[in-house]
Image (cartoon, grey):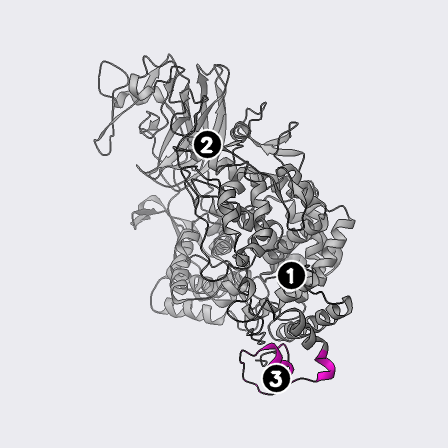
């Protein structure tokens, strides 16, 4: 390991916190006199001792750059000085020459440190597959749909992403979890059961009436045939359908006659329509469950009067039941609940369900996982009289190779090469082969012996780690990096062939493979995983909006929020649209749920599509998307500090420094007597707070016109004093909250530019389009390479931004430039 680098080299090797002047005393005066003068004259008056401004004590700052926080602090010094933010305008200012000499000195030392680090380990350490990549890789390797991610411990994101190597450490718990996950995967892959019987079942909800007791009214009790428990149901029967009104498990839409016989993929067809909805569609929700834990598998908007037949496929588990429900139809125009007055007197809208048809399981048999692994080694179907029961499964196939030991060697060698995603080194498969052969010798049986070898491969370092060596990546490492960047999984056969031929190392070959993967369905893994972390969509469940303040919020809206952001990013990627659309766009990607939430008419389908933004509508870009606005707020109030910090960090890549010690947070007034702007004004009276809040607060203020679920507002909602709301929600008057003080979304940027609202603020951001391009590029580079952006990477990022902007600034173009860059092609 190389010795720690010191900002200004001391005569001793001990790493000690040294004052700026004491460090300089040990250096050549001729070389560092200008630095000594700069610090003493322009810095230490404000940034020294316990009272250092913004808590930044330059005098006691260590010079050991091997400490990450120290390195970040010196880079912070460089950035503030280079942007002319320090010294401040109201202080004595250095000449341009003095400023440049300091910057050149700091840049040289930081680059020298990072260059020596890169020689030893590359830009980052070895990185392992994160738990999502592990599941995806096992799925593509073994051809099994098995949920493994939740069997593994949470990964630790760094720099905002769980692909960053430094956060992907090993622990004893992880090793044990990998062993368990590998066993689950291998057992699912070598499935020798007899073929499950595929069947098409069409169930009419009217047939479920047989399970209701003979009561005088149809809204009686439903008898659960499994538990014997009774549930009240709310429904109305027609000649050919059952009309459902209630949005709950006990609404009468449970298909108790239907049973799922085996795990697998099933095809659904449902015929239904809206009833008494005055021309509006009614939502149809389909769930799978085992008596609790309702799992959504489908959502559709059903038109009035004329039945619509919808089709979709879903993965189901053995023993699950199916439940259908209407969405948001519990109250009629008189504001009466169907639960209060019963279906017979209810005049509100409902959902008439004629039938539900389920076909499956659709999976081929024997499964591809079995055929690919052992199909050529004595796989045969057993006659009826030889089939036995094992672990509650009837075995219908056997694997009986002529030479079991040779078969183990062939299967494990082939599997190891695919698992390691590169050619095997000499005898690299030998330990796994020996493990299986030894098990065979102990009479474990061929299949059990094979499973032992396969499990060992799935927990080996060669499988769990992405094989990259310092310096220029070889063809297989490039293929791996590209695959995990664009698909969140292992290379497919075509990409692996490009690595084998070496064509991926050419500019044309690499571009061809990148373009192919971006155009493939597998790119959805990138869209979902990147936006989930860049925009914090994975945290959409982190807060639960107060339903008294936000009664319009529900799970359907939440899922649509996330889907909107994902589909917007997909639109940019598919059509290579300008990255500046991240800040502002003239279109939205909406379905009916999101269009209603945004007050936009003319969208009646559950399918997302491109919609032109109406005049004077403030939407456009990601800042005003409901998912972003929800994850940057709590369930009750919004905070300009949280939102401002998020925009600086995620969208602009200008993260603010942590607050100084002992600085309290701003607590919102939930009764609405004081606005957050008034509370922040008091908070900024402190000099320690003002220097950061002048950057943080403006973007947060610009978003104040959007509430905690991304709805537009002109006044704050409050549970205290205020005006009553005259609107109705699903035919029910809103009585829980009132309208409080008016919203003010105006502000002034840190460099003094005023804005009146979010639209003017977005235009200010777009003045420096290159800043937006750079921020998105940095996020993509971190995600793709598994390393944070170092000081030494800045020139490469500059080139990526320049080249992509000169080619039109499209998102797809930007990704191509990143993949072709030295940052991507070197460890």
**Secondary structure beneath disc 3?**
loop
The rendered magenta stretch, by its main secondary structure, is classed as loop
Q: Nearer the viewer, residue 602 or 371?
A: 602
Whether label 2 touches label 1, CB < 8 Å: no
Q: Is residue 20 magenta?
A: yes
Q: Which residue is mark 2?
A: 740
| Tag nearer the camera, 3 or 2 | 2
Residue 425 visible somewhere in the drawing: yes
Find residue 516 and report its horizontal and vertical position in percent: 67, 48
Query: Local crowd at mark 1 within 10 Å, few (<14), some, or many (≥20)?
Result: many
Q: Where does the magenta region start and end?
A: 7-33
| Tag nearer the camera, 1 or 3 | 3
Q: Nearer the viewer, residue 464 or 684?
A: 684
- Mark 3 and mark 2 lie on one chain; the one further toward the N terminus is 3
Find residue 333 and report its horizontal and vertical position in percent: 41, 15
Residue 522 visible somewhere in the drawing: no
- Cα distance between the residues tagged 2 and 1: 57 Å
Numbered circles on residues, count: 3
- Mark 1 and mark 3 lie on one chain; the one further toward the N terminus is 3
Q: Which residue is mark 3?
A: 10
Image quadrant where one finds the N terminus: bottom right
- Cα distance between the residues tagged 1 and 3: 41 Å
Q: Is residue 616 magenta?
A: no
Find residue 533 and report its horizontal and vertical position in percent: 53, 50
Give the left or right position of residue 96, taking residue 557 as reference.
right
Q: Nearer the viewer, residue 39 or 800?
A: 39
- Mark 2 and mark 1 lie on one chain; the one further toward the N terminus is 1
Q: Which residue is mark 1?
A: 478
Numbered mark located on residue 688 in the image: none
**Secondary structure beneath disc 1?**
helix
Find residue 410 and report its horizontal and vertical position in percent: 51, 63
In the depicted structure, whether residue 654 falls above or below residue 463: above
């Amino acid at each position: 390991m190389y010795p720690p680098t010191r900002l200004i080299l001391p005569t001793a090797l001990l790493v000690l916190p040294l004052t700026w002047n004491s460090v300089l005393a040990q250096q050549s005066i001729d070389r560092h006199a200008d630095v000594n003068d700069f610090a003493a004259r322009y810095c230490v008056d404000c940034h020294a001792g316990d009272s250092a401004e913004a808590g930044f004590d330059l005098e006691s700052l260590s010079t050991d750059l091997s400490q990450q926080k120290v390195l970040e602090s010196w880079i912070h010094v460089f950035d503030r000085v280079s942007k002319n933010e320090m010294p401040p305008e109201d202080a004595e200012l250095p000449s341009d020459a003095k400023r440049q000499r300091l910057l050149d000195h700091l840049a040289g030392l930081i680059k020298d440190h990072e260059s020596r680090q890169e020689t030893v380990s590359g830009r980052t350490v070895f990185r392992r597959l994160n738990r999502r990549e592990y599941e995806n890789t096992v799925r593509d390797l073994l051809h099994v749909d098995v949920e493994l991610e939740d069997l593994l411990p949470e990964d630790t994101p760094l720099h905002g992403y769980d692909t960053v190597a430094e956060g992907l450490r090993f622990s004893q718990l992880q090793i044990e979890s990998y062993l368990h996950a590998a066993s689950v995967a291998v057992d699912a892959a070598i499935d020798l059961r007899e073929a499950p019987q595929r069947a098409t079942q069409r169930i009419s909800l009217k047939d479920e009436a047989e399970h209701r007791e003979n009561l005088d009214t149809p809204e009686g009790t439903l008898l659960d045939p499994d538990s014997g428990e009774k549930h009240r149901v709310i429904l109305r029967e027609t000649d050919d359908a059952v009309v459902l009104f209630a949005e709950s498990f006990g609404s009468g839409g449970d298909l108790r006659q239907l049973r799922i016989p085996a795990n697998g993929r099933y095809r659904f067809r449902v015929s239904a329509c809206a009833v008494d909805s005055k021309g509006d569609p009614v939502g149809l929700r389909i769930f799978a469950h085992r008596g609790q834990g309702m799992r959504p598998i489908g959502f559709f908007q059903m038109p009035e009067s004329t039945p619509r037949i919808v089709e979709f496929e879903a993965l189901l588990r053995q023993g699950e039941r199916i439940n259908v429900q209407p969405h948001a139809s519990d109250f009629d125009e008189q504001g009466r609940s169907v639960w209060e007055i019963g279906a017979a007197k209810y005049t509100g809208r409902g959902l008439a369900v004629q039938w539900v048809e389920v076909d499956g399981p659709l999976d081929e048999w024997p499964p591809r996982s079995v055929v690919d692994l052992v199909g050529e080694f004595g796989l045969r179907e057993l006659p009826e009289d030889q089939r036995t029961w094992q672990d509650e499964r009837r075995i219908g196939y056997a694997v009986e190779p002529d030479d079991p030991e040779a078969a183990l060697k062939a299967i494990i060698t082939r599997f190891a090469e695919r698992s390691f995603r590169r050619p095997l080194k000499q005898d690299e498969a030998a330990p796994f082969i020996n493990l299986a052969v030894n098990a065979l010798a102990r009479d474990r049986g061929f299949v059990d012996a094979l499973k032992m070898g396969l499990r060992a491969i799935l927990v080996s370092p060669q499988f769990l780690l992405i094989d990259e060596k310092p310096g220029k990546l070889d063809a297989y490492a490039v293929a791996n990096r590209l695959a995990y960047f664009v698909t969140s999984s292992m290379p497919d056969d075509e990409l692996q062939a490009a690595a084998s031929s070496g064509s991926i190392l050419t500019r044309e070959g690499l571009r061809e493979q990148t373009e192919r993967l971006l155009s493939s369905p597998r790119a959805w893994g990138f869209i979902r995983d990147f936006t989930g972390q860049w925009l914090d969509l994975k945290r959409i469940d982190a807060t639960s909006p107060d339903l008294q303040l936000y009664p319009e919020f529900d799970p359907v809206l939440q899922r649509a929020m996330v889907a909107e952001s994902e589909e917007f990013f997909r639109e940019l990627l598919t059509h290579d649209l300008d990255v500046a659309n991240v800040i502002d766009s003239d279109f939205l990607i909406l379905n009916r749920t999101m269009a209603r939430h945004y007050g936009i008419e003319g969208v009646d389908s559950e399918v997302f599509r491109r919609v032109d933004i109406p005049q004077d509508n403030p939407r456009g870009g990601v800042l005003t998307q409901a998912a972003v606005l929800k994850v940057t707020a709590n369930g009750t109030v919004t905070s300009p500090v949280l939102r401002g910090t998020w925009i600086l960090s995620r969208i602009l890549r200008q993260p603010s420094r942590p607050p100084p010690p002992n600085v309290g947070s701003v607590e919102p007034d939930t009764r609405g007597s004081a606005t957050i702007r008034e509370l922040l004004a008091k908070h900024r009276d402190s000099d320690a707070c003002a220097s950061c809040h002048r950057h943080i607060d403006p973007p947060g203020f610009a978003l104040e016109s959007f509430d905690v679920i991304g709805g537009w507002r002109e006044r704050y909602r409050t549970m205290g004093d205020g005006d009553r709301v005259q609107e109705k929600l699903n035919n029910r008057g809103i009585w829980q909250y009132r309208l409080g003080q008016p919203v003010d979304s105006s502000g002034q940027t840190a460099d003094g530019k005023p804005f009146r609202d979010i639209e003017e603020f977005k235009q200010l951001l777009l003045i420096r389009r290159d800043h937006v391009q750079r921020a998105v590029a940095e996020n993509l580079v971190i995600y793709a390479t598994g390393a944070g952006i170092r000081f030494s990477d800045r020139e490469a990022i500059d080139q990526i931004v320049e080249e992509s902007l000169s080619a039109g600034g499209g998102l797809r173009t930007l990704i191509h430039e990143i993949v072709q860059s030295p940052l991507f092609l070197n460890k």
